[in-house]
């Protein structure tokens, strides 16, 4: 099991900076390949060009960190600088060679991006999922190691249940995390992509998406029963509860009695809700 994720890169290399310790060497750019564990899939082309222009004018101010892999070198940290060097037309690049395991490579790639807040919400979710699967960590263990709350991690990982096309819309910023979470509340999961298109075409905000999902769910539930107009107070409270629990919540009233239904979609999701309610077993 990995150690010290929450303490960042310094936990793996105490007393030193990953890209500033060790002997600097120069190697050919065509010998360098991307980190196979890099969680970041989207790079800002305009920002890369600006960095390339700066490198052409001032040179590379900090070497990148790599590890030897066969006849090639895999990037440990500094992929933006590497890509900018390619744009700048450089043939060689200064590097520091580190000896790292696959587990350390994955940790460092994810930590570098999380600490710099470079990831989209989907990339962040995939990073959490990758760490849990490869390092055999539970959400609770990952939460403690990264210094992130368990609900934060759970809410991101849940987004991976969305269809691929919807995740792509979230990756490029067309859909927000709030809209994605609201779409997860649809009872008819086969309609998520269709409803996502409607959300984008009509420019619906998060609250409007929640109301649309609620309406569609009521249509599924009632079948041929004529619709009842929901009390404005009840609808407002449902919306507050959905925000609080991060899932679909319905208040069902019958005269002075009723019940509150909180939906969950997995064992982890149930544990997240119980944690919010302070009902999780010690």
Image: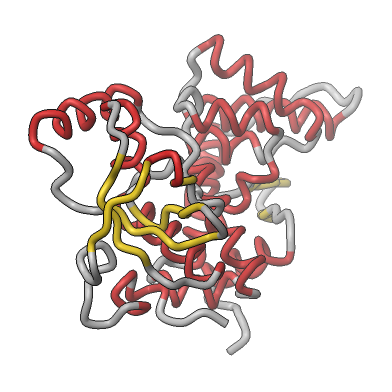
Number of numbered tags placed on the structure image: 0
State which quarter of the image contains the C terminus.
bottom right
Tell me which residue sits at (72%, 35%) in the image: 186
Residue 156 in sight in this render: no
Q: Quadrant of residue 196?
A: top right
With respect to residue 234, does 208 lie above or below?
A: above
With respect to residue 239, does 168 lie above or below?
A: above
Model colouring: secondary structure
Tell me which residue sits at (23%, 29%) in the image: 52
With respect to residue 237, does 268 lie above or below?
A: below
Is residue 265 found left or right of 139 in the rendered image?
A: right
Tell me which residue sits at (36%, 64%) in the image: 97
Q: Nearer the viewer, residue 112 or 104?
A: 104
Q: Quadrant of residue 267?
A: bottom right
Residue placed furthest toward the top: 201
Q: Position of residue 28 (x, y in %)?
A: 37, 43
Q: Position of residue 34 (x, y in %)?
A: 48, 46
Q: Nearer the viewer, residue 115 or 36?
A: 36
Tell me which residue sits at (55%, 75%) in the image: 140
Q: Position of residue 190 (x, y in %)?
A: 81, 29
State which quarter of the image contains the N terminus.
bottom right
Q: Position of residue 18 (x, y in %)?
A: 28, 67
Residue placed furthest toward the right: 224
Q: Quadrant of residue 54?
A: top left
Residue placed furthest toward the left: 58
Residue 119 in sight in this render: yes
Is residue 64 found left or right of 67 in the rendered image?
A: left
């Amino acid at each position: 099991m990995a150690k010290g994720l929450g303490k960042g890169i310094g936990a793996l290399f105490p007393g030193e900076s990953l890209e500033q310790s060790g002997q600097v060497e120069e190697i050919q750019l065509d010998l360098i390949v991307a980190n196979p564990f890099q969680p970041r899939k989207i790079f800002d082309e305009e920002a890369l060009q600006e960095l390339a222009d700066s490198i052409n004018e001032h040179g590379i101010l900090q070497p990148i960190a790599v590890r030897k892999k066969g006849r090639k070198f895999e990037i440990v940290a500094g992929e933006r600088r590497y890509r900018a060097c390619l744009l700048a037309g450089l043939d060689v690049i200064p590097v520091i060679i580190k000896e790292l395991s696959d587990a350390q490579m994955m940790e460092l790639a994810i930590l570098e991006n999380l600490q710099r807040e470079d990831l989209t919400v989907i990339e962040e979710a995939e990073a959490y999922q990758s760490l849990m699967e490869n390092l055999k960590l539970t959400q609770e263990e990952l939460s403690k190691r990264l210094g992130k709350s368990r609900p934060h991690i759970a809410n991101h990982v849940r987004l991976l249940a969305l269809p691929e096309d919807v995740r792509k819309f979230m990756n490029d910023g067309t859909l927000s995390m709030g809209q994605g979470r609201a779409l997860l509340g649809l009872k008819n999961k086969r309609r998520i992509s269709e409803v996502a298109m409607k959300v984008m075409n009509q420019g619906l905000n998060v609250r409007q998406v929640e109301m649309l999902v609620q309406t569609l769910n009521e249509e599924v539930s009632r079948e041929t029963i004529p619709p009842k107009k929901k009390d404005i107070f009840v609808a407002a409270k449902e919306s507050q509860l959905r925000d609080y629990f991060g899932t679909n919540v319905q208040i069902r009233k019958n005269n002075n009695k009723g019940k509150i239904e909180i939906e969950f979609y997995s064992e982890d999701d149930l544990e997240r809700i119980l944690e919010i309610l302070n009902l999780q077993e010690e």
